[in-house]
Amino acid sequence: MSESVDVSRLASIVEDVPTLPSVMFEVLAIAEDENSTAGDLEEVIMRDQALSAKILKVANSAYYGIPRTVETVSRATVLLGFQTVVGLALTVSVYDTLWGAGKGHYLDRRELWKHSLSTATGARLLAGDARGKEGAVAFTAGMLHDIGKSIFDTYLPEEYSKVIDACHRDGIQMHEAEDQVLGVTHGDMGQKVGLRWQLPDLLCETIRCHHTVTAAEDEHRRYAGLVNLGDFLTRHAGIGEPADMALPDLDQEALKLWGGGEEELKAAADELEKYRDQIESFQP
């Protein structure tokens, strides 16, 4: 019973979403420059006092468990890693931008944050280099994978209520109900906004394809798979509330891309469980 949203209306929504703070474009440029240093990153982030304060708040949270207070962005970069701090800056900016657009109509933003943080944690744990660049990028992609839900909930509340109803009535996943009711999924919408924000192609493609891993471009498919599996672990652990009713099946293509088996995935689920308290108590 598709009631597809008019293409021109979708385009206007993408344009209506606020842009990211200008400092983020500088942060992303630094992240792309292999010669950039922790000092370069700190210099840019410190231009936005609110952003730097929030990054330090996250760095000092129980989630990271750093024994001493982190007082500078450069110190956070040394302890957490360059790509991790870039990811934190991007995540904080994106969520501030989206949450600032409205409190939401049908989605509990705090629960969606917990779901995203758990998915990001799972994706990082599954990465081949959990504490290195792949782990940091997988974490960032996991944090951003569901931004399309917030956009729909803010800008299409009447139509999204029908999506929620379809999820409850038919016991289907959100992306299936979105496709059924709107003709476009939160992955599609998240990618469109990500492109407008000039986010890296890897993040945009992972957002688009975290439920449809085989549709991702070859060079980005592994990250889509890591986020898909992180989401799978999170949903089955019941951490946070993504508003879906049906639990996802294990995506065998994502498992293949990861390179492990179901026993190794169970071990990752046990590892994720150790983060439950930190995730549940996290204050964005």
Image: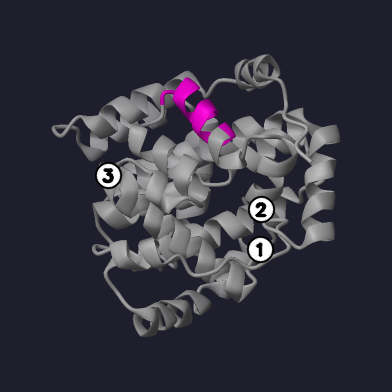
Between 3 and 232, the residue placed more toward the observer is 3
The local crowd at label 1, few if under 14, some if 14 to 19, many if 20 or more residues have their Cα within 10 Å, is many
Q: Of helix, strand and loop, which one carries label 3?
A: helix
Residue under pointer 3: 218
The residue sitting at 72% across, 26% down in the picture is: 5
- Left or right, 173 with reference to 93: right
Kind of residue at disc 3: Asp
Which label sits in the foreground, 2 or 3?
Answer: 3
Task: Answer with mark 3 or mark 1, whichever residue precedes in sequence.
Answer: 3
The residue sitting at 65% across, 19% down in the picture is: 7
Q: Position of residue 28 (x, y in %)?
A: 34, 29
Q: Position of residue 178 (x, y in %)?
A: 69, 43
Which label sits in the foreground, 3 or 1?
Answer: 3
Residue under pointer 1: 240
The local crowd at label 3, few if under 14, some if 14 to 19, many if 20 or more residues have their Cα within 10 Å, is few
The residue sitting at 86% across, 34% down in the picture is: 158
Kind of residue at disc 2: Leu
Between 126 and 18, the residue placed more toward the observer is 126
Give how far apart the Cα atoms at labels 3 and 1 are.
Answer: 30 Å
Magenta range: 189-198
Kind of residue at disc 1: Gly
- The answer to whether residue 122 is visible is yes
Residue under pointer 2: 112
Q: Of helix, strand and loop, which one carries label 2?
A: helix
Q: Of helix, strand and loop, which one carries label 1?
A: loop
Magenta span includes 123: no
Instruction: For the residues labelled 2 and 1, say whether their Cβ atoms are less than 8 Å apart.
Output: yes
Task: Answer with mark 2 or mark 3, whichever residue precedes in sequence.
Answer: 2
Instruction: For the residues labelled 2 and 3, say whether their Cβ atoms are less than 8 Å apart.
Output: no
The local crowd at label 2, few if under 14, some if 14 to 19, many if 20 or more residues have their Cα within 10 Å, is many
